[in-house]
Image: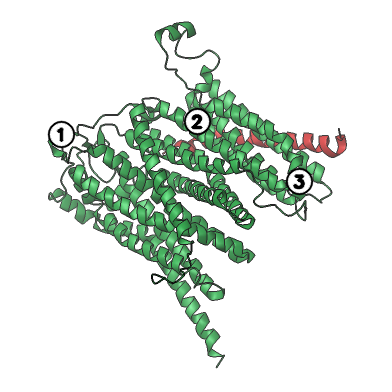
Chain colours: A green, B red
Amino acid sequence: MNGPRPILKTGLALTILGLGLAVVALVLTGFGQFSAFAAEHAGAAGEAAAAGLYGPAPKLTAADYPAIAGVNGRIVVWIVAQLHLWFAAFVLAVPIFVFIIEVIGMRTRDKRYDDMAYEFIKVSITAYSLTAVLGGFLVFALILFYPHLFTYLSTIFSESMFYYALLFFAESAALYIYYYGWHWLQGGFKKWVHLTLGLVLNAVGTTLMLLANAWLTFMMSPAGVDAAGVFGGDAWAAIHNFLWNPINIHRFVANIAYGGSIVGAYAAFKFLTATGRQERAHYDWMGYNANFIAICALLPLPFAGYYLAAEIYAYSQQMGITLMGGIFAWLFIIQAVLIGTLFLSANYYLWCGMGRSDGAKRYTKYIKYIAIVLVGAFLVWFTPHTLVLTNEELKALGGPHHKILGPLGIMPAKNTAVNVMIIFTAISFMFYRRANKIATVPWVKAGNAIQVALYTAGIANIVFLGIYHGYFTNTVYKVAASIPQVLTTLVVIAGSITLDSFIYRGSKEVGSLQWGRIPERAQYALFLLAVAFTWLMGLMGYIRSGIRQHWHVVDIMRDASPDAFTPTLGYAANVVSVAAIIFMAMVIFVFWIAQVSSNKTLPAGYWKE
Amino acid sequence: MDTKGYVRPFAAALVVFVAAFLLLDTLIMNMQGLSLIFDK
């Protein structure tokens, strides 16, 4: 009787795995098939366009924008779209690292990872419902307040919107089975099924994001339409527009950093409300892992952002100059302050976390130097190029540029500063990792010397590239020098991690890590990380959308509504801040629900006491 | 200062890394490297 069962089990395993992989493959290659389909039908669609099936982009007047109950349509769409995006970023990112943590748990056979992954996904379940509700609200708001724009976009993206709806069902199904089946699908083969579900969930979620990104990037860099906005019938051309991939990369990385910061805030919330020592230790460990995820994604994020900005310039110099040289330039100063805050709080958390190890005192003396460099780079990053001054101040200064600090206002200085910040954050992390270890290899001194030489040469090279190409060559080289700067940073970090792994091979531990031995103020650094990320995304999202200025679809469809003007920065910052406060209130609700769901009250006799 | 155990490896590694980074800069900053990245 025992003979056929393993065969049956293996067969079933292979079938389910095959099905899972087939779904993933279908999702991943969906675009290609879609493209082939579009290419096949492009001719016919072109003829249809010529026959008048697709009209030009509508030319609107203020009367084409319905006024409903005296509500400002732009503010409603702005806030709802922003709230939807924050939640969507969170619920798309969490399953990515939950899947990775689950795999780590399976490989290491450490149940703590599995428990942590489950707790992370539990938080995202309520957030998922809110994402869907806000998505529905956004569609209604667009239909009500911008009916012509919505009709035009849905004509071009009809197929992708239909697939989006189907994929949304698939994602909901995968997420609910993944979450509710967590404890059911444990051990051996069942765990593989669960992991496959996680993979499917992530593939579908990422595809959803890619589709939605196509709609918004079409509004910035339209493709597949002629100068009058007549759709040529090639849906893939409209999806695969100029800014699609730069946004895809930037959002994918940023979502992971954001997701990490939000679950970090959850862990901090649970740490601060924990009553027992064991519970504090658990949430301290969870907070550390969340911060680690956020830092890992935060390090490459400035490069992804820089790439996106460079591609915006490449697509339209006018849009690029509006972005960083025009009205939105001062928001980039706020961006620099917020990103600097992110780096400082992430580092601060790591420094506080070193207290978990008794061996950390060997490295604490270096922290003040890291802090000085980080603050110095932070100050360079947010030094403005042109100051906003009164006439008296202008006279006293001799112009809008400061004689000494003025040169720090241009990108080469800022690129240098951000690369130095990234490298010093990597040093903080290296110290954290080393804090509880004692190297045993005989060449430890030489290894450390090589390590220091690597950092010294790398930083010297970044500063040299920034100063020489930034100030003594022409603009083409100024921009180009950012590439070797980035590569230097990556080489230094990768080289240092590799060298460290050799130096600490077979190392001894100072003692067991004291999880939970971290000051409460460190938890506020995690809160700060989440709030700064949220505000930053809101402000930068406004810039990305705002550089279209008076266009719904750049150069194709003009915005003729009474709100077709760029608001003052203070006004925009207020709208984003109100949205951020609403989002934070909703996030607190999500945390509270997650807390309530684990509370149990044992009734004495139900309602018949 | 431990010359043999620390200073010498540091100096040797510094020379190697500086040379390697300068080579990297030269490769990327020459026109061919630029055109690979910036040409559309």
Q: Which numbered disc, 1 or 3, marks the residue closer to the eye? A: 3
Q: What element carries label 2?
A: helix
Q: In 3D space, how far apart are the residues under numbered discs 1 and 2 (Cα atoms)? A: 38 Å
| Left or right: residue A307 compared with residue A106 | left
How packed mark 2 is, by other alpha carbons closer than 10 Å (few <14, some 14-19, many 20 or more), is some
Q: Visible in this render: residue A231?
A: no
Dot 1 and dot 2 residues touching (CB under 8 Å): no
Q: Residue A222 at x, y = what percent?
A: 29, 42
Residue A359 marker: 3
Residue A87 marker: none
Who's the residue at 72% across and 48% down the image?
A: A357
Sooner in the amino-acid sequence: mark 2 or mark 3: 2
Q: Residue under circle 1?
A: A62
Who's the residue at 50% across and 77% down the image?
A: A13
Name the residue furthest front. Answer: A609
Along the line of sight, the residue nearer the viewer: A505 or A596: A596
